[in-house]
Amino acid sequence: MSLKNIDKQYVANTYARFDLEIVGGKGSRVYDDNGKEYIDLATGIAVNTFGIADDEWISAVSAQLAKFQHTSNLYYSSPCAILAKMLCEKTGAKRVFFGNSGAEANECAIKVARKWAQDTKGEEDYTIITLKNSFHGRTITTLMATGQDVFHKDFGPFPAGFAYAEANNAESVRKIVAEQTCCAIMMEMVQGEGGVLPLDKSFVEECVKIAKENDLLIIADEVQTGNGRCGTLYAYEQFGITPDIVSTAKGLGGGLPIGATMLFERVENTLNPGSHGSTFGGNPIACAGAISIISRLDEATLNGVKERSAYIFNSLNGAEGIKSVSGLGLMIGIETEKNSTEVLKACMENGILPIKAKTKIRLLPALNIPMEDLKRAIEIIKACAKGE
Ligand SMILES: Cc1ncc(COP(=O)(O)O)c(C=O)c1O
């Protein structure tokens, strides 16, 4: 039986996989089972921050692997504490809770917001305002936080306490605040799964104002936008705000499962022993990988992200067959005149691996993708969008 057929028969049927088996790679190049080489423009959906099998990341992870792989949260262990300190010092957060995925980071953010409201406001103040077209995860609660009806079927009943405002429409946020008892406004600075759409800075600022006036928390879901992806350590920095809670995952571990919920001053003491937990959260190997990623996200790397981003925008804006280019840093959505599924297929045939976001082509390359690979990939995208 071929590997593809084994997978089709035995793995839960939740993914419409491409007809492609990846067997290895290095940096921004990956190889399939036939030896065909591709330029990777998706990094496992914004996960492999410095590409495949990056030497520095491998040595950080291997060094920890040789010491101990897991201890549980019953004991102290260095990688978890060091990573939390690093994240706090770099962002101004006071404490960090570690889980294993983006959805879990958001679950924690939601629990913290609800408990903070119970502790400081009242039991009724549990509603969290999220934005239409958002995506926050696939647990029952984060599905409900997700502001897209398509995710609110099949698995009901869903938890109450979420209300959806229009992105970039502060009046719509104000209306919910006036009608319901709320505790937080939660948003992605760039709606990723929703089509790589950055929020307007003025809207984000207005949400902060509404939050101040009404004693609400701001939760930034930086699961996809975070960890250098948008050209700053976290994308909220470019929107001139400091959230109360920041959730992140994906690129943080550079390829290992980790989620982090950063708790700023207003909620630093909301969680206490027994109020939340995770067996694997703060796992030493995942944290060692994350320490190596975070310590490399310096000014030079972030400037490199901005340069590569500018190159992509300049090359694609106005190109034949390209309707629009959206996004921030190396999180980019391309609207094509031709059907994007056809464009994607042509891209793969021509040796590059972007993915899709709704009807757009989405690029999430390694933050250090070599310029010559990026240039080649952009020429292929242009050719495929044009129809050569
Ligand atoms: C903004 C955002 N939040 C949450 C999630 C869920 O993350 P995970 O798949 O790691 O649970 C995603 C995943 O795409 C995301 O993009």
Image: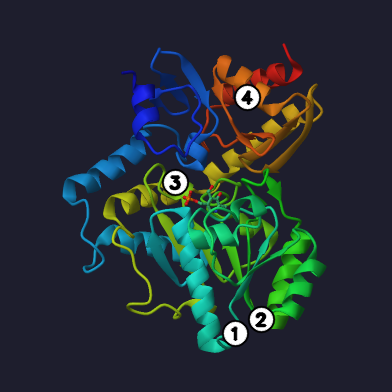
* CB atoms of marks 3 and 4 within 8 Å: no
- Mark 4 crowd level (few <14, some 14–19, many ≥20, 10 Å Cα): many
* CB atoms of marks 1 and 4 within 8 Å: no
- The residue beneath circle 4 is 344
Q: Can you tell which mark lies on residue 296? A: 3
Q: Nearer the viewer, mark 1 or mark 4?
A: 1
**Residue occupying the point 78% across, 62% down:** 202
Q: Nearer the viewer, mark 1 or mark 3?
A: 1
Q: Position of residue 385 (x, y in %)?
A: 72, 21
Please say if 34 is above or below 69: above
Nearer-the-camera pick, 11 or 381: 11
- Mark 3 crowd level (few <14, some 14–19, many ≥20, 10 Å Cα): some
What is the CA distance from the residue labelled 3 to the residue labelled 4? 31 Å
Identified by mark 4, the residue type is Leu
* CB atoms of marks 1 and 2 within 8 Å: yes
Q: Seen from this angle, which residue lies furthest left? A: 67
What is the CA distance from the residue labelled 1 to the residue labelled 2? 6 Å
- The residue beneath circle 2 is 181
Quarter of the image where one finds residue 388: top right
**Residue occupying the point 36% across, 45% down:** 256
Quarter of the image where one finds residue 189: bottom right
What is the CA distance from the residue labelled 1 to the residue labelled 4? 47 Å
Q: Helix or strand or loop: what does disc 4 sit on?
A: helix
Nearer-the-camera pick, 306 or 136: 136
Q: Earlier in the sequence, mark 1 or mark 2?
A: 1
Q: Nearer the viewer, mark 3 or mark 4?
A: 4
What is the CA distance from the residue labelled 1 to the residue labelled 3? 44 Å
Identified by mark 3, the residue type is Arg
* CB atoms of marks 2 and 4 within 8 Å: no
Q: Position of residue 361 (x, y in %)?
A: 66, 32
What is the CA distance from the residue labelled 2 to the residue labelled 3? 42 Å
